[in-house]
Amino acid sequence: MTLISSKLAAETFIVPIVYGGGDLPEITEFDCDILMWDGKPQYANVLDNWIPEAPYFQDRGFNMPSITPKDVQQQIIDYCVECVLALGFKQGNFHMEAWMTTIGPVLIECNPRVGGASIFDLHKQVYGVDPSVNFFLSAMGIPINPPRFETPQCARLFYLVTAHKTGVFEGETFLDKAKENEHVISTVYFKHKGDKVTGLDKGVPEWIGQFDMKGDAKDLESLIRELDDLVKESTEEAGRQTAGEVVNFKPNRRRSTLADLE
């Protein structure tokens, strides 16, 4: 078996366990930000990644706290810490991404930095720990061991809206409905009127906007459903505001072989 075929086989046969489902989005991936000092974890927590839109692996929905069982979260945390140490890192912030499978956690990525988008703020608002501040403190040689809440202080979610239609934006109001929701705390447009955009119909969908939500921790599941509904409305409206096709479009990433399992 060649090296290339081995990599393809690994991607095909490592299938994550699916959590959620039913009237909740499916969860297949976990982000775990870990603060390390002197080779020991000082803080770590898990947030859920919603399953990407097939056939591409493009991040979209995130929620914290996780809806998964505590023992699953702890397995992810312990495994990710072991990965950080195995790679020789001893201090800093590490944004780890992993699947849970029938044989245990499997590493997807190790990023020696703070998680992107609103991830730092999820940790800050839900558990009271700012990964960015502690990352910089550790980089300056200042020992870290931040105080934190043992129980979630709120539910925090955000969604990276992906384009479903390839073309050119003719409007910029597809997040207006989300702005009216009492739990939405911010909205951002990544694409503007006149911009070309690649949609799911032609290749890896581009992120065209983002909105963040916050509510009571006890209402997490209802907030997830609420976010999912807003996503569908925003995505459909973005499609209505997109016209024409991008000229000379070329695929920008190969399709995943996981798509063939269906």
Image (cartoon, rainbow, N blue to C red):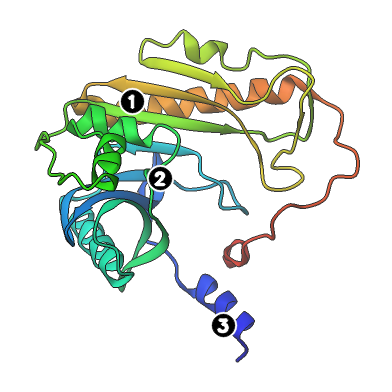
State the residue lying farthest toward the bottom: 1
Q: CA gap, disc 1 to disc 3? A: 41 Å
Q: Position of residue 80 (x, y in %)?
A: 28, 61
| Image quarter hosting the N terminus | bottom right
Q: Position of residue 40 (x, y in %)?
A: 15, 59
The three-letter code of the residue at mark 2 reads Asn
Callout 2–callout 1 Cβ contact below 8 Å:
no
Residue with the mark numbered 1: 223
Q: Quadrant of residue 150?
A: top left
Q: Secondary structure at mark 2?
A: strand
Q: Secondary structure at mark 1?
A: helix
Callout 3–callout 2 Cβ contact below 8 Å:
no
Q: Residue at x 21, y 53 (%)?
A: 36
Nearest the eye: 143 or 1: 143
Q: Residue at x 66, y 33 (%)?
A: 163
Q: Is residue 38 left or right of residue 16?
A: left
Front position among marks 2 and 1: 2
Q: Position of residue 30 (x, y in %)?
A: 35, 51
Q: Residue at x 70, y 19 (%)?
A: 192
Q: Residue at x 49, y 22 (%)?
A: 230
Front position among marks 1 and 3: 3
Q: Is residue 38 left or right of residue 193?
A: left
Q: Position of residue 99 (x, y in %)?
A: 37, 60
Residue with the mark numbered 2: 49
Residue with the mark numbered 3: 6
Nearest the eye: 123 or 89: 89
The three-letter code of the residue at mark 3 reads Ser
